[in-house]
Image: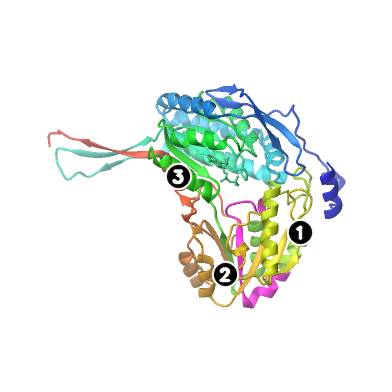
Amino acid sequence: MSSLRFLRSRCSLRLPAAMLRHYSLDASHPLLRTQGYVNGRWLPAASQFPVLDPATGEEIARVSDCGPEEAKQAVDAAYEAFHSWKRNSAKERSIVLRKWFELMMLHKEELAELITYECGKPMSESLGEVSYSASFLEWFSEEARRVYGDVVPSPAKDRKILLLKQPVGVASIITPWNFPSAMITRKVAAALAAGCTVVVKPAEDTPLSALALAELAEKAGVPPGVFNVVPCSREKTPAVGEVLCTDPLVAKISFTGSTATGKLLLKMAADTVKKASMELGGHAPFIVFDSADVDKAVSGAMASKFRNSGQTCVCSNRFLVQSGVHDAFVDKLGRAMDAELRLGHGSEPGTTQGPLINTRAAEKVVHQISDAVSRGAKVLKGGKRLDGSFMEPTLLVGVTTEMICTKEETFGPLLPVIRFNTEEEALAIANASNVGLAGYFFSQDVSQIWRVTEALEVGMVGVNEGLLSTPEAAFGGVKQSGLGLEGSKYGIDEYLEVKYMCFGGLKP
Ligand code: ADP
């Protein structure tokens, strides 16, 4: 724990004694599972891979390293189970999903501990993720019963036209490490509600949350083969990914992760013309107009930038601030960073900023900072990498569009501020990107709010809000940020196909 001691002294964490409740993860943790889960059974593999606590670099578990054979077994089991799962009534599927939701809420703290230890985020955020994750099971348990087809007026008197909705089949689900639980349920809840079965390949950094979900799925009554999990190391990922994206028994792939990996999976899925949902990278602009309430903009910026230490695909990546409020915004933001951000181990009460997922992620942020500084940007707060993968929250001003941090997704606690003069200029900068996931802006001018909302080339807009995710709303991007939607009434459509029934031969 030397790195933690270092951090405590460096960041001078001062915590009231009453808050010193420590969370721990050891082998007796009630939801710690370390084998793959296929066809309702825990599956040993020939070898294991380590799961590390990103805050300390210490090994917290060794997990079965599933290979292509286990992946194939999982696909076969899911295919077999599909034929019975889809025949359950929507209400029966709904009841199972609801039970799974309730079990997640019952085990909220234990699930949150797994998230904090494998992904590094503070417990408060991990608890938030568990609620968010469970809310997809709740939402889609309700949506399961609202899959309506259509009866369409026919041009011929002797025919009826019916449009039926049916589940697509087996779905391969490939998920990232930044929301180890929620990125699974956001897909799986919709899939199971529709009548599909799934094989989940969690990120190699964070398999424990996925395996804990399997344990609770079983307790909730999810039948064998309906929900399968094949954890694997980075080395085995391409071979497992190939099975999941090319096996003819798989009808659909759903992926959340980097744009580069998404493109690779789409190419693999093309040969068998699988359906695909892709939730890929973002490069969110955060615009503060002269008409904004600056205090609200500062709160929005803090929430949108520093959640999960800046490691979410909807985190603001580029801050565009109009000249009239620039100095006030930067000043208040700097104070808020000093007052509100505390680095530390995620299990430490009071921590708001955990480590980045690994040292590579920290190196990327350092690279973006030094590139910006070499081109004239000024560091107002932070700027340095600490022990391991901890990174100081960093505020840069004098940023220009030539700098790498305004061209690439950062995925870290770097807040670069570009000063602009006109709305047109801000929109041109915001839209000069080949991705478009989220975008945020602060304004109190109603006409400007409509103009800018319509002009931003993104799938989701936060107006005077820095946080926007919720299961009731549609999550998805435009341009190279992806394909399809998650959550909302549209999320279940990703796992359904429409079958046209022409019912003829009727006597008019
Ligand atoms: P990151 O670089 O942040 O890990 P990725 O997009 O590579 O982002 O990872 C997201 C998910 O995609 C992880 O589960 C990872 O294991 C998986 N992945 C990466 N490469 C492949 C691949 N060739 N086939 C299948 N899954 C992959």
The residue under label 2 is: 443
The residue under label 1 is: 384
The residue under label 3 is: 266
**Which mark's residue is nearer the viewer, 2 or 1?**
1
**Which mark's residue is nearer the viewer, 3 or 2?**
3
User: Looking at the image, is mark 2 or mark 1 earlier in the sequence?
Assistant: 1
Is the C terminus in the top left, top right, bottom left or bottom right quadrant? top left
What segment is highlighted magenta in the picture?
306-331
As drawn, is 113 to the left or to the right of 19?
left
Q: Nearer the viewer, residue 448 or 395?
A: 395
The kind of residue on which mark 3 rests is: Leu
Residue 204 image position (x, y, % from top left):
62, 38
Measure the alpha-carbon separation of dots 1 and 3: 37 Å
As drawn, is 85 to the left or to the right of 321?
left
Measure the alpha-carbon separation of dots 3 and 2: 38 Å
Residue 126 visible, this orientation: yes
Disc 3 residue: CB within 8 Å of ligand 1? no
Q: Is residue 150 magenta?
A: no
Is the N terminus in the top left, top right, bottom left or bottom right quadrant? top right
Disc 2 residue: CB within 8 Å of ligand 1? no
Secondary structure at badge 2 equals: loop
As drawn, is 151 to the left or to the right of 361?
left
Residue 276 image position (x, y, % from top left):
43, 43
Does the residue at mark 1 contact the one at mark 3 (Cβ under 8 Å)?
Answer: no
User: Looking at the image, is mark 1 or mark 3 earlier in the sequence?
Assistant: 3
